[in-house]
Amino acid sequence: MNIRDKIKTVIKTFSMLSEGDTVLVGLSGGPDSVTLLLLLRELEPSLNIHAIYIDHGLRPHETPDEIEFCKQLCCQLNVPFVTRAIDDLPDGQRKTPALLREIRYRLYEETAFSIGASRIALGHNKDDQAETIILNLLRGAAMTGMSGIAPVRGRFIRPLIDVPRLEIEAYLNECKQTCCLDSSNLKDIYLRNRVRRHLMPALLDYNPNIVNTLTRNAQIIREENAFIELAVTKKMMTLVSRKKKNRIELFLLPLQNMEIVLLRRLLKRAAASVETIKELGALHIEEIMTLIRTSSTGDRLYLPGGIRVIRGYSTVVITSEPPARCPEKTLPLPGEVIVREVNCIMRTTILDRFQRPEHRRQECLDADLLSTQLKIRARVDGDYFYPLGLGKRKKVQDYLVDEKIPRDVRQAIPLVFSGDTLVWIAGHRADDRFKVTQETKRYCLLELIPIKYD
């Protein structure tokens, strides 16, 4: 099968193009992109082809000549041509290959949108595919990484993905078409270049067919990966309890009994579906799986970027929401105040006799020791009290730590004050100085009443 037939087969197999499509071609002036532009123009005459050169700002002595070459080639082919530059990066960021790739793809997308292109064609070839698989293997990639470069990803297409580099060079020789050579491809400062120049030739000594072997395996892995992703999609439809912009809740029990292969994928997908969460790494996914399988209700994970994973009674929550904080409010005596920020009502009632608390969200204290206007607020550094029954002073922070209160919950706990003196850590412990004694004549029942907002 010659190069033209291979490209036609790839385009058809992966439904890359339709008649009359507007296509933006990434044109660097190198052998791959030049071949791609020439063959698309030859094989798909109905296409509305545009080309773009992206200046990375790394080779100022070569770039002007490359741009001029691309401009002249596009002029000969009657192809509209534009250039875009990656300018100085903000915040002193360094031009790493990963960052440059991210910006390059963004520029492709922006340009395609501006010209109405439905496809962006890039010149990755079969050897690039094999090198990418080796690179991903060296970096410890999972199945997705071992599947290599996808022939189609969104609007990006790679018609040369099944064409070896030698066939591209032979085609250019046949056409007597010149091209540009990127001097950075000869430098060993980049890992890909070292793989291309040193590791791949060594592997060819062990297996002369190594490129075909790697790319064939990658195709198998992509197909199996697609099958697993479909299974994950079906599972997700039954597992989401509730979802918001920065929070997702999943039913716990099915996760605990799920096959580990699906669980790992599903958690990654769930986290990625939360708009404010970037992709979680493999180590963090493993930590979440451990939380699901071995931890107790109320246990948490604190991950980078302000991400929290909370194991509830029947759900697992993945969220980047800032932890709730109790605002400062006045609490009448008697009376009540709604604290929507932490989903509760704080209530005080004056009694003429002692009422034993029914649970920790109630406390009965000496009303005559309290001011007529109480206040509530969140904990701040330096807060202290005398825990009921302990008889000695203790910092609120130390108390909450000793009680194993999760750190993202501590600011949500209302603290009740009489003047500047702490009376009650609502739902937890009262101050010994306000306890009921034999001399107490009036009693104050303090209550924390949870409420829910849909």
Image: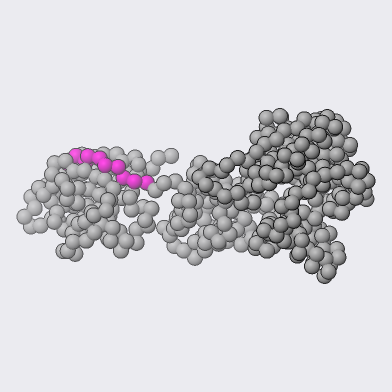
Q: From the top left corner, tell me how far across and down residue 284 is, in percent.
A: 53, 59
> 443 or 290, which lies in front?
290
Q: In the image, 93: left or right of 206? A: left
- Per the rendered image, the range of residues in magenta is 324-334
Q: Is residue 86 magenta?
A: no
Residue 152 appears in view: yes
Q: From the viewer's perspective, is residue 165 above or below residue 199?
A: above
Q: From the viewer's perspective, is residue 280 above or below residue 27?
A: below
> 178 or 446, which lies in front?
178
Task: Say which residue appears at 88% left-offset and 46% top-offset.
Answer: 172
Task: Say which residue appears at 82% left-offset and 36% top-offset.
Answer: 73
Task: Say which residue appears at 28% left-offset and 61% top-offset.
Answer: 398
> 293 or 265, which lies in front?
265
Residue 156 appears in view: no
Q: From the top left corner, tell me how far across and down residue 432 is, in percent.
A: 16, 58
Task: Say which residue appears at 39% left-offset and 48% top-offset.
Answer: 323
Q: From the top left corner, tell me how far across and down residue 84 is, in percent.
A: 67, 36
> 308 or 434, which lies in front?
308
Q: From the top left corner, tell me how far across and down residue 253 is, in percent.
A: 53, 57
Q: Main secondary structure of the magenta part?
A: loop
Q: In the image, 231: left or right of 217? A: left
Residue 342 occupies quadrant: top left
